[in-house]
């Protein structure tokens, strides 16, 4: 079965420290992977995606993610966390079982990031 | 213009009411989506319109009725809802949908719906 796992419900990090939000996936073939962020009382915002190419993907707001095929992971990282990064983060992978118009995204359960001043 | 605009932002409705949620984008995106989101949970896909045709209905109860009048507009008509339907309803769009689905989704800020 296709799935996305975000093993941590909550991540706490001090401002200025590096942060990592973990994501592992299970789909057949080459995955299309996405990270989205949701600030309180807001819609989701796209951060970055991996389709093909360089395993290190750079995205919005200084975030980056590393695709690791052997570990089926796509962890989100930032070298120096800001208090304003506190939000809910979702990893998603494109459905690879449905090839036609039924194709959709499969979402992880989300990780709440708290950056403490 | 890289925005998806949803109206209203907040809606309180009784279980016998009929109301509609509206979504608009002017990015030339050809796929539009309705999601339902409960607090601190991932968005749940409800409907997808691809090139103005309904391509996905995730077995949503008939009290929710989507409509896509044109490529820029998406409506969600609500009738006889239940309190458990209270949630944040998000509209999103992508440049293409269907088989490709390799581009990022743009989300609106959502409509916070409360059913009383």
Image (cartoon, rainbow, N blue to C red):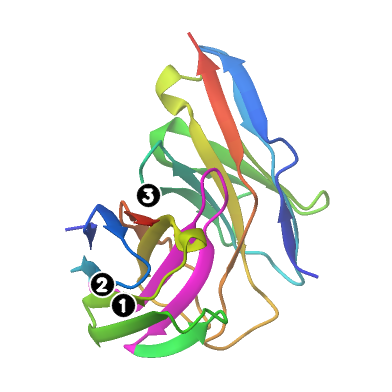
**CA distance for labels 1 and 2:** 4 Å
Quadrant where the N terminus of chain B sits is bottom left
Which residue is drawn at the image coordinates 50% and 20% (left, top)? A81
Which residue is drawn at the image coordinates 56% and 84% (left, top)? A102
Chain to which the residue tagged by mark 3 belongs = A
Mark 3 crowd level (few <14, some 14–19, many ≥20, 10 Å Cα): many
Q: Secondary structure at mark 2?
A: strand
Residue B45 among magenta residues:
yes
User: Residue A77: in sight, yes or no?
Assistant: no
Compared to residue A39, the image places residue A28 above or below, namely: below
Q: Which residues are magenta?
A: B28-52
Residue carrying label 1:
B77
Residue carrying label 3:
A43
Q: Position of residue B105 (x, y in %)?
A: 41, 62
Residue carrying label 2:
B20
Q: Secondary structure at mark 3?
A: loop
- Looking at the image, residue B58 sits to the left or right of residue B109; the answer is right
The reply to whether label 1 and label 2 mark residues of one chain is yes
């Amino acid at each position: 079965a296709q799935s996305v796992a975000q093993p941590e419900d909550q991540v706490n990090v001090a401002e200025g420290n590096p942060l990592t939000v973990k994501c592992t996936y299970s789909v057949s073939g080459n995955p299309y992977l996405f990270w989205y962020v949701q600030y309180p009382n807001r819609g989701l915002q796209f951060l970055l995606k991996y389709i093909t190419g360089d395993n290190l993907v750079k995205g919005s707001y200084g975030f980056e993610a590393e695709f690791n095929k052997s570990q089926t992971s796509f962890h989100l990282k930032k070298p120096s966390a800001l208090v304003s990064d506190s939000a809910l983060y979702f990893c998603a992978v494109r459905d690879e079982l449905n090839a036609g118009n039924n194709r959709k995204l499969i979402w992880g359960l989300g990780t709440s990031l708290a950056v403490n001043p | 213009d890289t925005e998806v605009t949803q109206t209203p932002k907040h809606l309180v409705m009784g279980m016998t009411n009929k109301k509609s949620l509206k979504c608009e984008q002017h990015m030339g995106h050809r796929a539009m989506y309705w999601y339902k989101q409960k607090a601190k949970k991932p968005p749940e896909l409800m409907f997808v319109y691809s090139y103005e045709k309904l391509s996905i209905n995730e077995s949503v109860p008939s009290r929710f009725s989507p409509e896509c009048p044109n490529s820029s507009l998406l409506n969600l008509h609500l009738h006889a809802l239940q309190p458990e339907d209270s949630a944040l309803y998000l509209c999103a769009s992508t440049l293409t949908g269907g088989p490709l689905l390799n581009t990022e989704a743009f989300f609106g800020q959502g409509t916070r719906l409360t059913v009383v």
